[in-house]
Amino acid sequence: MVEDWLSLSEVAGMLGVHPSTVRSWSDQGHLPAHRTQGGHRRFRRTEVEMWIQTHREDSLDEGHLVVQAALKDIRVRVSEGSLENEEWYGKLDDEARDQYRRSGRALLQGLLDSLARDGAYDDSEARSLGFEYASRGWRRGLTAAEASKAFLFFRNVLLEAMLSVYEESTIQTPKAWGNIFRKIYRFTDRIQITLLETYDAYQRGSRSNGPA
């Protein structure tokens, strides 16, 4: 029986992604590939079909890989010292500053988990992060506006990193990129709304517990 071999572009068509994404997956060992004598990638159809079935639940798609690529850029941007120019950051002690510096990674991981989910949207992770930003800001004496600015700083760092990846990427699938950014806004909007709702609850509790 003659093997049914596929080219890189044919596999990209089957998976609905750009050929550069298939190349990246095969280089990382995610997708089984074989080399011809001339060094070209070839894929067995049966292996690709089996890979699709095996990895469908993992949601290993462009969005997931793009956000992973943004992680390094986020680390660089946060460590560039731009935090020092933020007024809210100047009100924090060293422990709180370290917690906020790690917020960018927590935000990115939450977004990765959100992008990996298939089916009905679950905003529990976004709500959890919103509560975390609010409770941390409240404990450190930040106003609701300052806590919002702290979150927006990291949200904007994330967006800038994503835009940089987009501008440098060879992926030409507007629908995939549109889906990624819609998910980012939906995820981060829920964080900010929860942050403000939590601050409202704290403030109501503070007033009710105040002097008669």
Image (cartoon, rainbow, N blue to C red):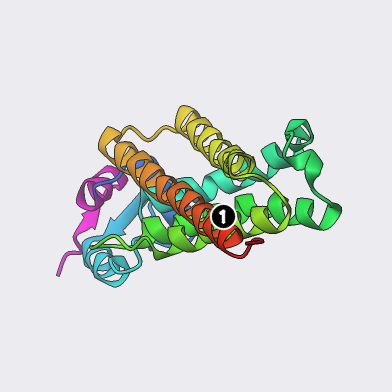
In the current view of this chain or complex, which residue is farthest to the right?
94
Q: Nearer the viewer, residue 71 or 50?
A: 71
Q: Is residue 92 above or below residue 116?
A: above
User: Which x, y percent locates residue 183?
Assistant: 35, 47
User: Which x, y percent locates residue 189?
Assistant: 41, 45
Rendering quarter of residue 120: bottom left
Q: Is residue 170 above or below residue 43?
A: above
Where are the magenta residues, as a range? Answer: 1-15
Image quarter (top left, top right, bottom left or bottom right) of the N terminus:
bottom left
Question: Is residue 187 something that shows in the picture?
Answer: yes
Question: Residue at (39%, 58%) from the top-left corner?
Answer: 114
Q: Seen in the image, is 8 located left or right of residue 137?
A: left
Q: Which residue is mark 1?
A: 203
| SS at badge 1 | helix
The residue type indicated by label 1 comes to Gln
Rendering quarter of residue 122: bottom left
Q: Seen in the image, is 57 located left or right of residue 165?
A: left
Q: Is residue 153 magenta?
A: no
Question: Residue at (62%, 62%) from the top-left corner?
Answer: 212
In the current view of this chain or complex, which residue is farthest to the top?
167
In the current view of this chain or complex, which residue is farthest to the left?
1
Q: Nearer the viewer, residue 169 or 182?
A: 182
User: Which x, y percent locates residue 28?
Assistant: 50, 57
Q: Is residue 8 magenta?
A: yes
Local crowd size for mark 1, using a 10 Å CA cut-off: few (<14), some (14–19), many (≥20): some
Question: Is residue 34 something that shows in the picture?
Answer: no
Label tally: 1
